[in-house]
Image (cartoon, helix red, strand yellow):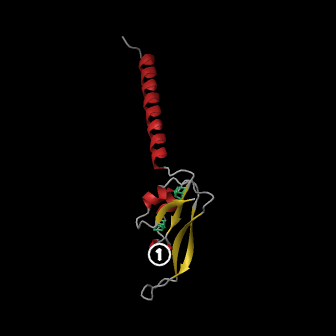
Amino acid sequence: MTTLDELTARRQAETDRVMLMMNRMRTKQREEIRGGDDVVAFVNEEACIGCDQCIIVCDDNAIELYDVPNRSPIIDVDINRKARVIRDNCTGCRLCVLACPTKAIVSIDR
Ligand code: SF4
Ligand code: SF4
């Protein structure tokens, strides 16, 4: 008959096996979306709505927001915000490209 210790050990072994498998899958996924050292993200200012999504997904602190004057006479706010890429920090992972709702970010050759 299986003892409690054996059951606990078996359960731990199974947890370790699943964790290892999931970590391998994550690494593979990251490698697949990573653009590589040769590319860097670029923001098309016209298309950027300053929504923050790219900053949220960027793990490398490679995007910042800056203020621009509001160009629309019908909206009562003083400034708009736009995103820009800090090139030296950018690893070309493309997460921001995938996250941007207006497709304002593209990958370009470094
Ligand atoms: S996710 Fe796109 S639209 Fe939003 S701030 Fe970033 S670049 Fe601009
Ligand atoms: S490509 Fe990756 S590292 Fe570069 S700005 Fe986008 S999310 Fe950040």
Please identify the quarter of the rendering in which residue 18 is found: top left
Q: Is residue 64 left or right of residue 32?
A: right
> Based on the displayed image, in which of its 4 quarters is residue 72 positioned?
bottom left
Q: Nearer the viewer, residue 80 or 34?
A: 34
Viewer-closest of 77 and 4: 77
Q: Amino acid at mark 1?
A: Glu
Residue beneath the point at 46% across and 59% down: 97
Counting from the top left corner in percent of width and height, residue 78 is at 52, 83
Q: Secondary structure at mark 1?
A: helix
View extreme (left): residue: 1
Residue sitting at x 48%, y 55%: 94
Q: In the orientation shown, which residue stands out farthest toward the bottom?
A: 73
Does 86 sit left or right of 106 as displayed? right
Q: Residues within 10 Å of mark 1 (few under 14, many from 20)?
A: few
Between residues 1 and 63, which one lies in front from this camera angle? Answer: 63
Q: Quadrant of the N terminus?
A: top left
The C terminus is located in which quarter? bottom right
Q: Is residue 46 above or below residue 61?
A: below
Across and down, in percent, residue 38 comes to 56, 54
Rendering coords of residue 11 (x, y %): 42, 24
Asked if 8 appears above or below 65 in the picture, the reply is above
Q: Position of residue 77 (x, y in %)?
A: 48, 82
Residue lying farthest right?
A: 88
Please tell me whether residue 83 is drawn above or below residue 95 in the rendered image. Answer: below
Q: Residue at 45% across / 72% down in the picture?
A: 47
User: Label 1 belongs to which residue?
Assistant: 46
Going by the picture, which residue comes out furthest to the top? 1
